């Protein structure tokens, strides 16, 4: 009984740490208007409040994942909590544009350490059915947390101040640090040294790639720089004995399909989470708080379905769940693309959200599980880093694609319809990856 209690505390630490990252992003989305007013920002400067975070988060993910393998998961996790908590405090205290942008960049480093390390700790701690259940909760948190945090962010933006959400992260980080010291196993990591050339090239390559997607100017030179340094990075990983991202992670057909599918799936979903609240506020007259609450049909269904994933996995396998979940998500997204102002919220948005919620509940956990399955224990952190890279980069690319698609059409509703339709196309491609890569790859191992 004591052992089970210890595992419950560890799962709490993992899920709460992940939720902090999700909440952080939602506060920025829902608090945009208030942040602009308080800090006197223009539109270009405001975009960098999010972009600075995305750059460091995406750039340091591979390093964050591998650092836990080499230096010990608990030690690196605690460092991530300190950086994230301190960064949150500085964001909450920001009085001008340079301060909030620098603080968000600092916070992104903490997130890049926390995200892959928490997943690696989960892989180290749980085995068998317990691991399947824990990963189901972790995957569910990606969808549930994103939706719930929109509500919380809306409450802060409407009733309090956007700063409260960031200040909240400070005591939560301190509490997580205490629980980590008390309940996480202390490990010394592997023998070996960090691949500094791989670290340097991946950091520049990933940061340049993220910038080429979300930046305001010199995007083509940034993309060419990204290609150059990522090619250098892959060559370095091929030749070194201590890679930051072992290329053996990409020799597995199922895992390749998962990486491609997760990239496309999160791209569609990130765009959906970003543009749908704006539509509800501008076309249906919802407040920021009500736009967050309006995601409850998706959140509740997602939560109910996610609790069944561990049981369903034993019957259908990851591949079967993913095919079903992605297909349902694409169906819901296609339905949502027919929204019109006269259709209203319940039939035009809430009903498709229920279908999307079922698909999301069936998809996110299997994506996470298959992305780290069948890896060596010494590669758990690196594999977790790649899973999070696909999540982060896929989200950035998808968001950029959907927002660009929306901007090509005059009228928000028409733009929304075409953007969501593009999201359905991305989900269709993710479905092909599941059918032709993930399912056959899974069958080869059975």
Image: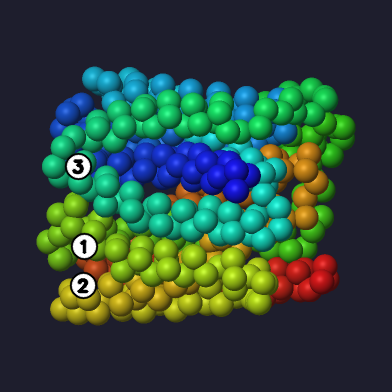
Q: Which secondary structure lies at badge 2?
A: helix
Q: Which residue is mark 3?
A: 157
Number of other residues with Cα within 10 Å of mark 2, as a class: few under 14, some 14 to 19, many 20 or more: some
Q: Which residue is mark 1?
A: 280
Q: Nearer the viewer, residue 314 or 332?
A: 314
Residue at 20 percent of width and 79 percent of height = 343
Mark 1 vs mark 3, foreground winner is: 3
Image quadrant holding the C terminus, namely: bottom right
Q: Nearer the viewer, residue 217 or 40?
A: 40
| Contact between labelled residues 2 and 1, with CB atoms less than 8 Å apart | yes
Residue 318: percent from left, percent from top: 65, 68
Q: Quadrant of residue 277?
A: bottom left
Q: Which secondary structure lies at badge 3?
A: helix
User: Eyeballing the image, is 33 above or below 45?
Assistant: below
Q: How many labels, in total?
A: 3
What whole-number distance in Å separates the C-alpha atoms at marks 1 and 2?
Answer: 8 Å
User: Eyeballing the image, is 105 above or below 155?
Assistant: above
Mark 3 and mark 2 lie on one chain; the one further toward the N terminus is 3
């Amino acid at each position: 009984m004591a052992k089970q209690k210890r595992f419950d505390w560890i799962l709490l630490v993992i899920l709460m740490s992940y939720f902090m990252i999700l909440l952080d992003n939602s506060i920025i989305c829902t608090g945009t208007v208030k942040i602009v007013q308080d800090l006197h920002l223009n539109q270009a400067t405001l975009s960098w409040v999010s972009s600075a975070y995305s750059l460091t988060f995406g750039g340091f993910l591979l390093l964050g994942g591998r650092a836990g393998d080499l230096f010990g998961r608990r030690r690196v996790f605690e460092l991530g909590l300190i950086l994230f908590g301190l960064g949150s405090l500085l964001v909450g205290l920001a009085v001008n544009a340079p301060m909030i942008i620098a603080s968000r960049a600092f916070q992104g480093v903490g997130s890049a350490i926390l995200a892959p390390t928490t997943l690696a700790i989960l892989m180290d701690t749980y085995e068998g059915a317990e691991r399947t259940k824990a990963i189901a909760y972790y995957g569910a948190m990606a969808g549930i947390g994103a939706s719930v945090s929109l509500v919380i962010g809306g409450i802060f933006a409407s009733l309090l101040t956007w700063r409260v959400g960031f200040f909240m992260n400070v005591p939560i980080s301190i509490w997580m640090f205490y629980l980590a010291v008390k309940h996480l196993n202390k490990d010394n990591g592997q023998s070996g040294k960090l691949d500094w050339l791989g670290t340097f090239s991946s950091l520049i390559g990933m940061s340049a790639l993220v910038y080429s997607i979300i930046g305001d100017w010199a995007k083509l030179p940034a993309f060419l720089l990204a290609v150059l340094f990522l090619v250098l990075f892959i060559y370095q990983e091929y030749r070194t004995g201590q890679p930051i991202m072992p290329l053996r992670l990409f020799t597995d057909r199922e895992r390749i399909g998962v990486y491609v599918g997760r990239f496309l799936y999160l791209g569609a979903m990130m765009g959906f989470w970003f543009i749908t609240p704006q539509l509800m506020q501008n076309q249906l007259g919802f407040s920021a708080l009500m736009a967050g609450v309006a995601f409850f049909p998706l959140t509740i269904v997602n939560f109910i379905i996610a609790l069944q994933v561990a049981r369903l996995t034993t019957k259908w396998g990851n591949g079967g769940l993913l095919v079903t979940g992605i297909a349902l998500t694409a169906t819901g997204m296609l339905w949502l693309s027919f929204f019109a102002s006269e259709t209203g919220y319940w039939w035009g948005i809430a009903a498709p959200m229920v279908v999307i919620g079922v698909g999301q509940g069936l998809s996110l956990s299997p994506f996470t599980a298959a992305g780290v399955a069948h890896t060596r224990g010494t590669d758990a952190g690196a594999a977790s880093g790649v899973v999070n890279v696909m999540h982060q980069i896929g989200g950035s690319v998808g968001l950029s694609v959907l927002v660009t698609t929306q901007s090509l059409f005059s009228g928000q509703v028409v733009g929304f319809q075409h953007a969501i339709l593009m999201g359905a196309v991305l989900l269709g491609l993710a479905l092909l990856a599941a059918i032709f890569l993930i399912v056959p790859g899974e069958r080869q191992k059975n």
